[in-house]
């Protein structure tokens, strides 16, 4: 084999790897959204911006909306995974589970406002992350 043949094979393999990485990301994204549909305590929506959550569910848990609405949690999780290699997504989620406290897994989000950066911690239900990891 000469240099050009080797180089062309490597280029083909890189393209194939990118396609497979994209397919893996799609499969994991689908697993995340399927898990979001399995929410046992799904909040009841009254209007676009108003939901009903049982008070008993709030006791001892965060009062953030993302914690109760797993569809919003899915967006938070995908935001965390975005830009990272899809092959390591399961490991990243398992690492988040190990660093969690009780039934809360926290994700950080930074929002830049000019020169000032606001950092927010967003709690996500541990059960939701466990269901995602189970499906993977």
Image (spheres, rainbow, N blue to C red):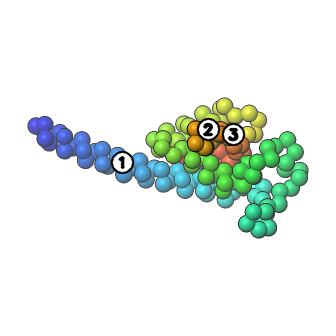
Position of residue 127 measured from the top left corner of the image (x, y, whole percent):
71, 45
What is the residue that sits farthest to the front in this orientation?
A: 114
Position of residue 34 measured from the top left corner of the image (x, y, whole percent):
61, 57
Instruction: Calculate the distance from the C-alpha at mark 2 to the C-alpha at mark 3.
Output: 13 Å
Q: Name the residue under label 2.
A: 117
Between residues 83 and 135, which one lies in front from this camera angle?
A: 83
SS of the residue at dot 3? Answer: strand
Please give the label number shown on residue 121.
3
Query: Is 129 on the left or on the right of 21, as rendered?
Result: right
Between residues 27 and 135, which one lies in front from this camera angle?
A: 27
Which residue is depicted at the point 52% across and 41% down? 89
Which residue is depicted at the point 68% across and 40% down? 120
> Are circles 1 and 2 on residues that touch, CB within 8 Å?
no
Query: Residue 47: which quarter of the image?
Result: bottom right
SS of the residue at dot 1? Answer: helix
Q: Quadrant of the N terminus?
A: top left
Please give the label number shown on residue 18.
1
Mark 2 or mark 3: which is in front? 2
Mark 1 or mark 3: which is in front? 3
Position of residue 7 measured from the top left corner of the image (x, y, whole percent):
19, 40
Which residue is depicted at the point 83% across and 56% down? 53
Dot 2 alpha-carbon crowd within 10 angstroms: few under 14, some 14 to 19, many 20 or more:
few
Instruction: Calculate the distance from the C-alpha at mark 1 to the C-alpha at mark 3.
Output: 32 Å
Instruction: Calculate the distance from the C-alpha at mark 1 to the C-alpha at mark 2.
Output: 33 Å
Q: How many labels does the image show?
A: 3
């Amino acid at each position: 084999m000469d240099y050009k043949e080797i180089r062309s094979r490597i280029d083909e393999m890189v393209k194939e790897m990118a396609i497979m990485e994209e397919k893996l990301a799609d499969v994991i994204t689908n697993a995340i959204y399927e898990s979001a549909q399995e929410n046992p305590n799904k909040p009841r929506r009254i209007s676009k911006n108003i939901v009903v959550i049982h008070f008993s569910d709030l006791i001892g848990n965060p009062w953030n909306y993302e914690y109760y609405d797993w569809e919003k949690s899915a967006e938070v999780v995908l935001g965390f995974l975005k830009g990272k290699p899809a092959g390591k997504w399961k490991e990243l989620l398992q690492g988040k589970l190990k660093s969690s406290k009780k039934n809360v897994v926290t994700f950080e989000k930074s929002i830049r406002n000019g020169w000032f950066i606001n950092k927010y911690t967003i709690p996500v239900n541990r059960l939701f992350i466990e269901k995602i990891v189970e499906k993977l």
